[in-house]
Every structure is written in structure tokens, then in C-alpha cells.
Amino acid sequence: MATSTLGKLDTLCHRLLDSAQLRTHKYFRVAVPQALTGQSLVAVVGEKGHAEDETEATHLATLLLQYGYLFPVIEHAQIVRDDGTLYRLQRPYFWPSHSTQTDNVEYAIYLNKRLLRNEQRHGLEEDEIDAYNKLAELLAHMWGFITAQAELQLKQQKEKKKADKVVYDSEERAFWRMRRPGTANCLEQHVQKVERRLRKATAAGYRNLVERLKFSIKTKPWLKALKASDTMVQWVDQLHDYDPLLAQPQPSNPWITDDTQLWTLNTDAVEVPTERRVKRWGLSVQELVKDPIGRQVLETFLESEFSSENIRFWIAIQDLKYSANAEIESKAERIYEEFLGPGAPCQVNVDQRTLEKTMELLNSGNPRRHAFTYSEEHVFTLMNKDSYPRFVKSAIYKGVLSAAQQQGSRRLGWRNFVFNMGAAKKPLDLGLFRQQATQDESG
Amino acid sequence: MSESGSPKIDADRPSTSQAGVKMPENAAVAPTAAADNATRQADMIDLLAKEAEELRKKLDLERQKLNDIPIQQAAERLDPLQNLGIKQRRILKGHAGKVLCMDWSTDKRHIVSSSQDGKVIVWDGFTTNKEHALTMPTTWVMACAYSPSSQMIACGGLDNKCSVVPLSFEDDILQKKRSVATHTSYMSCCMFLRSDNLLLTGSGDSTCAIWDVESGQMIQNFHGHTGDVFAVDVPKQDTGNIFISAGADKHTLVWDIRSGQCVQSFEGHEADINTVRFHPNGDAFATGSDDASCRLFDLRADRQVCVYEKESILFPVNGVDFSLSGRILFAGYGDYRVGVWDSLKVVRHSVLYGHENRISCLRTSPDGTAICSASWDCTIRIWA
């Protein structure tokens, strides 16, 4: 439990103590002093805790109860009821922030006190008797001290007024019910919060920081807030219809209807991608290449333009970056030979400077996992600025889209479509495709 | 770039012997308790810290000039969120201890979860059936992750290790468990890095590292945090070469995967950061902290965009995630509730009640059809 959270709960409860209307209630002809009903408790917690509605106020009150800031007077319970049930606010001395640790000796003194008193009213419950017996064994060497302390405390208490005594007894009881040593309570912390420690920053760390700050001031690479916010709002708005929690997915959300059709229609191996999915490719090149089918369609399109080496080069680099250590060298070698080396079968068109930088990385003797990082950027920019806009206008994309739209009436797989129209497997097919493509453009 | 087999022993590594030394409010102020046997070193740190502080002030001034409008204003043209009708749809019961972490499979329905009593369970979330249950040789299994192929899971925690287990219905799969990563303190978070081959971990030893799953070699480590790392995340777009990490030092650091260098850092939280998550557009991320707030930071604008907080929210945020479009920010709190925030208009839209103890982890499913929350009440719940 974070100490800052307990601090906030303390502040809230001080406000409650200041403003709650405590009075003596009647419960089956017994007077219950300094109490308030569930209704008024929820109302005051809601007001002081700035709750939005009654549900939130009740929930806040329940949390306060579970953390030991208030307790039910008559019957033990874990939640606050918004009714006539009587509650009492805990005395700050017993708040969890004041007593983070409880120990066996204190608990033994408390149980002893109970035993020394009227059995009918203060007798121990079964589990308390067990605890008492265990403690008597464990603390036998100081039992005399413990009983003496208990007697002393009782003597002091006798001087109090009766109503105060009743209240104090209930507060003490509520405290020990929650905080008995050795039992779990809600103050338990995640082990990482117990273990956590902060370390001294090092000179090297600071040097890096200074360098980073200097660079940042010099280059001012940051966007204006207006621009950044605007692009984000635009991006989010664009995806509104694709967000299953905002707009109902077609045909339905499996979690709500128990119908898994949505997932079957959207697997990576599906024959006809859904219209929504294909439309999403049109949003940006990132959306397109994120989808395995999208990648394949883009590749097919580029093949028809005789420039599929770019996307294949890019995919190969992605694969290389996330490959196992053992495969890095051979894969890097293969990429170089296929796309960059002299006489490479699929020569990629990168400018001289990028090529030089890449060669430098390749020959630096370092692992080659990220050796193609400059070429990757170059090729991706090329795809984004050059190929992608043409792809979105292409006959292939339009074809896949219309196939997706017709889905259901005519089962036309995108593979079918693409292989019939675009795939440059045979020169004949290609000719046919080009013819159609030009017709498409003129038409 | 070091792909050496063993962790580098670096003289400048954060020293773990300084346990318990409290950092001053601002991390850039020099620590007061400098080692006395190296006064010169301490003086230098002092100087550097002052320089950093001045640079930061200058930078803040410069930024202020560009801080023209808040995001709420940019989002004015959008309609407010309608009634979303999000309800609890599934409840997964089977853990006997506090559930600490969960992750979705890419098949959009399977879930792996880990708990404080050392159990790791693989569920079919859709049918709520348990498919595998493993007992780890440690308590507090703080992190677990599904591999992109869904053929493997990774998990670990107080054992300082991250182990992988291939999933199959033959034999005892626990026999095939292999430890891949080893830290010098507990492992707090892990995820596969876009393939089954690489594993990204964060640890209480204040470092992050990328590991080769097959050989267990460390590929790159990341030094720079001055406190325990509690969370890491990688953008969903596969074009970037960065990841982010955050933790007890209240900073979120942006790392270059290739070089191991920290390229950006963000601050603002007043207490530990427990969770970080990239916005689906990859240009921003959200954090959740012990200070009971979530915050949104923009990488390109290099600044905090907004704070999601409310007077009636007092408890730590332990899990955050976005809906598919990024419009909704879900936050799982220590007060047992899930807050549903309009991320752009920066207002709380609604609250999901159900859990009976603090929420430890929250994640949106890969296709955005549901969110899943794990809790100390031993249950996992799926909401849609």
C-alpha cells in the first residue's frame, strides 16, 4: 500500500470526522452512541470525497471500511450498506497510517484485557481463544508483564464515562479484527514495492542526459503541441469505425454474442478479407503492412510494377531484425547478396550515401542485426511516398476492395483475383492485367 | 552494439550497494550522500547535475513557447463518447492466489496469467476453460507473456529469471521449461519483441535487456533508470526501433533498441510509475502511477499532453491500455475499479465495478473487442 495513498485517505477521513453528524441511535432499545447510519455515511463520504454518484460514494465508503477507517457497530461486514445499518468512524490512533506494524505483545495484552472483563460482554470468540493459547505459549517468558499491562490499562479505562468506554471497546475490537498479527490484511504490499530501491545516478548517466538535452535544445525536433494534438485527434477519429468498443463490429462482437464469426472472417489465412479490413489498408502504409494479407497484396501490386524488390527487401530486413542470434550472419549475408551486392538479382535502388553507410555497418565487425537500418528507412520512405499512393489508386486495390464488398454473394478470393489479374507469373497474364489497368485508368 | 554472451560489467553501472538512499524530489539534483572515497567523482556528478538542471529549465522555456493549446481544445470537434455498454462478459476462476499479470494470445481469445502463489495458467478466455496449469519454483510470478506465434509463453518474477515454456498438449510441458534471462534482482515485466526469438525484460535491478530466446544470450542491455523498472512496452507499429520503460524513479525512458541508448525521457508523475502503454498510433504513450493519475505523453512533441485524474480517485493505477482507436483509455486501479476515460476530451466516461480487490494488470485484446483485467481477488475478468 503506497504511503501516499494512505495520506490521501487520512485527509479524507479528517474531513469526515469534522463534518459527520454523529449521534446516539437506538438499536433494539439499546443506545448506540457516536454512530451514524449507512445513508448518512454514504452521503457525507460522497460529499467530502467528491464522488460522482451514489455508487461511487458507496464504493469509497466500502474502501474506507476495508482499510479500517470506519466499521459497522453491530455486525461485522466487509461492505458498506446504503441503509439504516449503524457505522462508527475509527479513532485516528487506530488508522493504518498510525500503526503500520502490529506485534504479538500488543495483541496479547488486548486479549488479556478482554479475559479480565465481564465474560458475557467481552468473552473471546473461538478463533481468538486459539490465538490466545498460541500467544501464551510463544510469549510465556513475558506473560507476567503482559497481564500486568492489561490490568493497568483496564484500571485507567475504568475512570472513563460509560458511553466513551463502549465506543473505545468497539474501536479497539474493530482494529484488532483487521490487524491481527500474522493474518493477511489489505495493507499488504506488492513485493516489488517492498523490494524497491532507488540508486544514485552515475556520472555517465548525467553525461548522457546533458548530451541529450543539449541536442534537444539545438535541434528542437519537437512538434508544436497544436500540431501534435491535431494529428492525434485526426488519427483517432479516422479509426473510430474500426474500434469494436466504439462501433459495433460486423457481424458481431464474439464476447457479447458468443458467436465467433468475426474471428473466423478475420484470420490471417482467410480467402476474402472483410471490407472493413481492406478499407483500413487505405488509411496509411503502416496499416497496410501491419496486415499479413495487406503485405502480400502490396507485394503483388509492386510485382506488377516490376518493383517488388523494395517491399521484399524491407520484409527481409524486418525478419532479420527479430531473428535468432544464430541466424543473423547468414540472413544478413543473403540480404546483401540478393538486394545490394554487385550483380544482385533484385538490386534495390538506394542512393550512394545510404549504401556507403550500410556497407560501413556491414563491415564494422559488429553483429549485423541492425546493419541495414539506413537502407530500411530509405526504402520505407520510398514505399510510403511513392508506391503506396499509387497502390491505393491501383486496379488491384480496387479489385480486392470490390471483392471484399461482394463477399457473401460471390466467393471471390483475393488470391484468385490477384492471380487472375495481376500476378506476373506468365507474360500473358501480365499483358492482360496491364490492358485492364489502363482501361481502368482511362475509364 | 554489443551482442556479447554475458552482461557487461560496467564501472558506471548503478550501484546496488546504495540500497535505501532516497532520491531527492527532482532526479537531476545530485544525490546528497556521495561516496566519500571519491569526492572528485562526486563533485563532477554535482557539476553535471547542475548543468543538466539548467539545460532542462532552458528547454522547458523553449517548449512553453510552443505549448499553445491543450488537447481537449483540439478534440472539441469530436462528438462526446456515447453510452458504450461495456459489461463483464467472462470471469476466469482458478487461481488460488493474487493474480499479478496476464497477457493475450494473438488468436484474440487465449490468455496466460500468473499469480503470487507461483501458478501460471493458460486459459481459453472465450470458453473460460483452463488449458495448462504450471507451478513455478517461485512465489510472486510478476510477469508473463504470450509469444507472437502463440506457441510459447514466458514468465518469471522473484526468481530473477525469465523462463520460456513451449505450449503443446503432449507430455509434461514444464519439463521443457528453459530459463532465458537472468537479472540481479526480481524480473518485473517481460514481453516478446515482435517474434518468438527475442525477449524484452525489465527488472528490479533497474535495467532492461533484450535476450536471444534460443541461446539465452543477452543481445542488448539498457542502463539509465535510477530505480526499479516496473513496466516496458513496444509500439504496435513494426517500423520503429524503440521501446519504453518506467518505474520507481518516476521517469519514462525511451530506448533505441539498436544502440542501447536512451533517446528521450519524460517526467511528471509524483510517485512510482507502475504501468506504461503505447497509444495505438505509436507516437504517444500513457502511464499509470501510485499518485493515482494516468498521464499521456507525446514523443514527437516531447512533452506531457494531459493528466487523467479526479478527486474521488485516491488509489494507484496498476494497469492502463487503449481501445483500438486510442479514443478510450482504460485504467485499472488499486481501488478495485476500472476507469473508462475519454482520452482526448480528458474526462472520465464511466466506471466498471466488479473486482473485489485491487486490479494488478489490464490489457486490451489484440483486435480490440474486449479488455481483460487481473486482480488480487484471484479472478480475471473480461469486459466488452
Image (tube, rainbow, N blue to C red):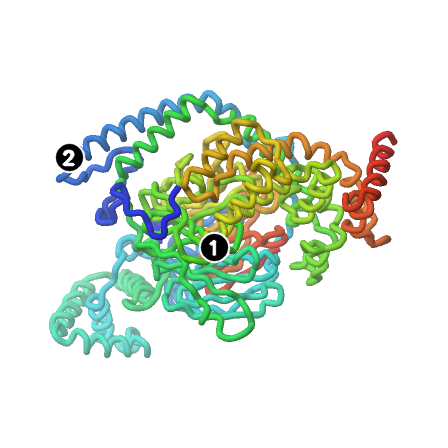
Residue B57 got which mark?
none
The residue nearer to you, when weighing B330 against B126, is B126
Q: Circle 2 sits on which residue? A: B39
Report helix, strand or loop for mark 1.
strand
Circle 1 chain: B
Mark 1 and mark 2: Cα distance apart in space: 44 Å
Q: Position of residue B364 (x, y in %)?
A: 56, 52
Q: Determine whether B156 is above or below B240 in the image.
A: below
Q: Quadrant of the C terminus of chain A?
A: top right
Q: Residue at x 39, y 51 (%)?
A: B218
Q: Position of residue B131 (x, y in %)?
A: 55, 70
Q: Circle 1 sits on which residue? A: B361
Circle 2 chain: B
Q: Is residue B261 left or right of residue A138?
A: right
Q: Earlier in the sequence, mark 1 or mark 2?
A: 2
The residue nearer to you, when weighing B321 against B147, is B147
Q: Is residue A278 left or right of residue A74?
A: right
| Amino acid beneath label 1 | Cys
Q: Quadrant of residue A381 in the image?
A: top right
Q: Residue at x 28, y 63 (%)?
A: A172
Residue at the extreme front:
A343
Numbered label tally:
2
Q: Residue at x 53, y 26 (%)?
A: B69
Q: Quadrant of residue B129 in the image?
A: bottom right
Q: Position of residue B67 (x, y in %)?
A: 48, 25
